[in-house]
Image: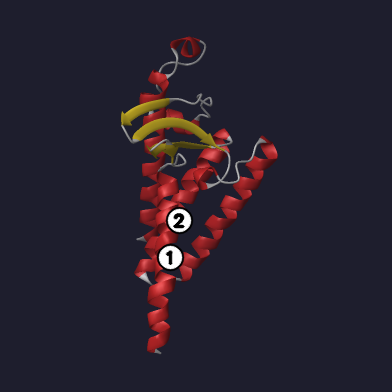
């Protein structure tokens, strides 16, 4: 069950990145820029197997507090530790892969359904971002929430899954493990 959930997160992440880049961002880019590049949107599998060009920063206002943007994140979730250059890409790939291996081993040893869900969210999200990093050298971020002139760092479905999984692990460790230890 946990591997199925991780796979669902991965697929939702990749499909959302494809749909946003191909059907929202590409049409919104300056026509002069597009005239020099490939204009036609790609199908999902064609997009997935090709390392498409890095599209320029673009924003599309959806609601007064929400934009779809095109941001390339070379760091970890929410733009933290944004590295530049090929060494940064390889370091982030290695770190992400180590995290995936760690959580997969933990998940295989786990018997709690709650913990399996947490780890599946983290693993699925991490794999989604690793795929981007391996293909583009950066992660596609496109969700931009803002209020009163402050923009929350752009993120994607993988980032959301990772944050939710880690948050649930923290909640479990503070509240449920403490109750379990006190009961014994």
Say few, some or many: other residues with alpha carbon within 10 Å of mark 2 (under 14 / 14 to 19 / 20 or more): many
| The N terminus: image quadrant | bottom left
Left or right relative to 107: residue 96: right
Q: Residue at x 63, y 40 (%)?
A: 83
Q: Is residue 16 left or right of residue 103?
A: left
> Which residue is rendered at x = 53% and y = 26% of the image?
54
Q: For this view, does 5 lie left or right of residue 80?
A: left
x%, y% of residue 15? 37, 37
Measured from the top left, where is residue 41 in percent x and y? 40, 21
Q: Is residue 111 visible?
A: no
Q: Most extreme residue toward the front, as rendered?
A: 148
Report the side of 121 relative to 100 (left or right): left
Query: Which residue is tagged 2?
Result: 122
Circle 2/circle 1 CB separation < 8 Å: yes
Q: Is residue 45 above or below residue 88?
A: above
Task: Name the front one of labels 2 and 1.
Answer: 1
Q: Quadrant of the C terminus?
A: bottom left
Question: Farthest residue in the bottom direction?
Answer: 184
Looking at marks 2 and 1 on the same chain, the residue that comes earlier in the sequence is marked by: 2
Residue 25's place in the image compared with 148, above or below, is above
Q: Residue at x 42, y 21 (%)?
A: 26
Q: Marks 2 and 1, Cα distance to the nearest angstrom?
A: 10 Å
């Amino acid at each position: 069950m946990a591997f199925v959930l991780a796979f669902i997160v991965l697929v939702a992440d990749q499909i959302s990145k494809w749909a946003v880049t191909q059907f929202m961002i590409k049409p919104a880019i300056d026509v002069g820029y597009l005239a020099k590049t490939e204009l036609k949107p790609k199908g999902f599998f064609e997009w997935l197997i090709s390392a498409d060009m890095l599209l320029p920063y673009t924003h599309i206002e959806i609601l007064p507090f929400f934009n779809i943007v095109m941001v390339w994140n070379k760091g970890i979730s929410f733009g933290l530790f944004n590295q530049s250059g090929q060494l940064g890409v390889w370091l982030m790939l290695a770190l992400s892969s180590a995290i995936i291996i760690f959580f997969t081993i933990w998940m295989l040893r786990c018997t709690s359904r709650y913990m399996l869900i947490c780890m599946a969210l983290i693993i699925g999200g991490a794999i989604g971002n690793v795929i981007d990093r391996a293909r583009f050298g950066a992660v596609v971020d496109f969700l931009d929430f803002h209020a009163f002139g402050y923009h929350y760092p752009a993120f994607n479905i993988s980032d959301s899954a990772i944050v939710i999984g880690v948050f649930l692990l923290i909640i479990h460790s503070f509240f449920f493990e403490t109750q379990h230890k006190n009961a014994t």
